[in-house]
Amino acid sequence: MRELTYGEAVNAALHRVMEELPQTLVYGEDVAVPGGVFGVTRGLRRQYGERVFDTPISESAILGSAVGAAMFGRRPIVEIMWADFSLVALDQIVNQAANVRYVSAGRLTAPLTIRTQQGNAPGACAQHSQSLEALFLHVPGLRVCMPSTPQDAYDLLVTAVHGDDPVLVIENRTLYSGAKEPVETDGPVRPMGGARTRRDGSDVTIVTWGAMTHRVLEAAERLAAEGVEAQVLETPWLNPFDVGAVLGGVRRTGRLAVVHEANVTGGFGAEVVARVTEAGAPLLAPPIRIGTPDVRMPAAPVLAESLVPDAARIAGSVRELVKG
């Protein structure tokens, strides 16, 4: 066990896969000599030399070259500095990487890992703050995960690099320099998928992922003080998604709330609600979705923070769901 921050855990995972898999490459904008805009890739260039390199500011070139390298035996790990910038390379991600296995009838794969980060932070503004996981979850052939803890940041990245399909590992900039936590760094490569109960409760099931997990746990403590016991179910892997765990929780509590930072309309919360209702889970009340309103993120930090669900707003919405 090592005491690591979220960002240090990402760095440790990169060191592990670079040592275990000599076919890995790490590249992107400012990841080599500068060590990454958030310092997550520091030390990699010094230790692994030309396998770690900086690129021009061209997301389409980064992703296009990574798809080709992956098809021919490499395991590239590329960083797209902000998830918003991945939109520049949608053709390479959606039409190329996600299609490799299908159009080759299984003869080729694209073991490509795309590290990116998203979510609101002070000064992020409208073009550096979007939560886009639902967009990529709509595309068959892509795996998507969102770690919320240092252990997840380590485990999910190691799993992604060892996989044979393109994986988006979506991190959150607000978590990189958080508190240190014990991280197991020599465990086995874990399978993709799965959910875990972060808090047990019998009145309502709250499903969440990514940085929102921490706010949901705080909201659950507030609700507990009022006599409302919420089960907090975190789903770090969104594809593959553990719908069975969600159904198990909802069948026990009878109520469902889904919380994500992404704006509500078209968010993955709608898919979670649809799968639960299609399965015929017995519900005591209609499910609810809690997310950011359908607006662009303002530049002023105080205005931006007022839009993202916080513990008070989550607790209020869940309280209304439970108490009617």
Image: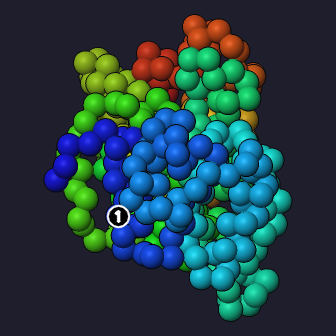
| Mark 1, other Cα within 10 Å: few <14 / some 14–19 / many ≥20 | some
Residue 264 visible, this orientation: no
Residue 173 against residue 71 in the figure, above or below = above
Task: Choose between 124 and 303: the one closer to the eye.
Answer: 124
Position of residue 99 measured from the top left corner of the image (x, y, whole percent):
76, 74
Which residue of the protein is positioned furthest toward the left in this rendering? Answer: 1
Q: Is residue 109 left or right of residue 246?
A: right
User: Badge 1 is on which residue?
Assistant: 16
Task: Choose between 110 and 265: the one closer to the eye.
Answer: 110
Q: Amino acid at mark 1?
A: Arg
Task: Choose between 13 and 136: the one closer to the eye.
Answer: 13
Position of residue 165 measured from the top left corner of the image (x, y, whole percent):
59, 73
In terms of image quadrants, where is residue 63? bottom right
Q: Is residue 316 left or right of residue 138?
A: left
Q: Residue at x 48, y 20 (%)?
A: 310
Task: Choose between 169 and 22: the one closer to the eye.
Answer: 22
Q: Residue at x 77, y 58 (%)?
A: 61
Position of residue 74 measured from the top left corner of the image (x, y, whole percent):
58, 76
Residue 267 against residue 20 in the figure, above or below = above
Residue 82 visible, this orientation: yes
Position of residue 260 measured from the top left corner of the image (x, y, whole percent):
55, 36
Looking at the picture, the colour scheme in use is rainbow
Q: Is residue 290 left or right of residue 191?
A: right
In terms of image quadrants, where is residue 44? bottom left
Q: Residue at x 70, y 15 (%)?
A: 298
